[in-house]
Amino acid sequence: MKKLMAAATLSLSMMITTSNALADNAIGIVLGDPSGISGRASLDGQHSIEGALAYATGDHSGLHIHATYLWDRARTFTVQGGGPIEMYYGLGVRLINFNKGEHDGELAIGPRAPLGLLYNINNPDIEIFGELSVAVDLTPETDVDLDVGIGVRLRF
């Protein structure tokens, strides 16, 4: 468990620090299911990689780690008197180390597909986001889960 957390933290920090110096990077929190630390690293104007180190509750409770390739600005909605709201979608992988139920102590892994909305505020440099994500656990048994979260990240 400690090795898994260390690897996830290292992966998330490398994802953020190895992107282009002119890129739009962000780190913050996400609340919902799961809740925890969220980061995003822009690859170019249309794509980014995001990840989270969080804790999930409910039937899929335990340490939650995910990384996702995103297609940013899939659709843009204009807001009167404010900046645009951008829709994004993606494909990635999710891991959960279950801590209750019949699979207590087992690791679930599988793909995840999020759909979200992002709103940028320029002063201060923050982004507010909301996301729905469908995940399919392939191990220890096949199961489908829906993750929901809202969050805020500081851009740098």
Image (cartoon, rainbow, N blue to C red):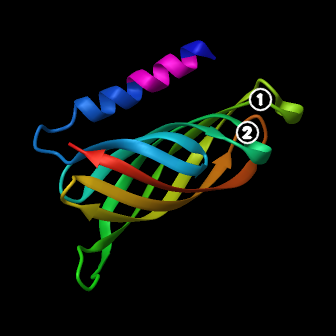
Mark 1 or mark 2, which has the lower sequence index? Answer: 2
Name the residue that disc number 2 marks: 61
> Range of the magenta residues?
4-10
Question: In the rendered view, does 37 fall on the left or right side of 110?
Answer: left
Question: Where residue 54 sits: x, y (%)?
Answer: 56, 37
Please tell me whether mark 1 sits on a helix, a strand or a loop: loop
Residue at the image position 60 percent from the left and 45 percent from the top: 34
Mark 2, residues whose alpha carbon is within 10 Å: few (<14), some, or many (≥20)? some
Residue 142 visible, this orientation = no
Q: Nearer the viewer, residue 93 or 61?
A: 61
Question: Where residue 91 sits: x, y (%)?
Answer: 46, 53
- Which secondary structure is most common in the magenta stretch? helix
Residue at the image position 37 percent from the left and 54 percent from the top: 70
Q: Nearer the viewer, residue 124 or 43?
A: 124
**Looking at the image, residue 56 lies above or below residue 136:** above
Q: Nearer the viewer, residue 74 or 9?
A: 9
Residue 117 visible, this orientation = yes
Residue at the image position 23 percent from the left and 82 percent from the top: 81
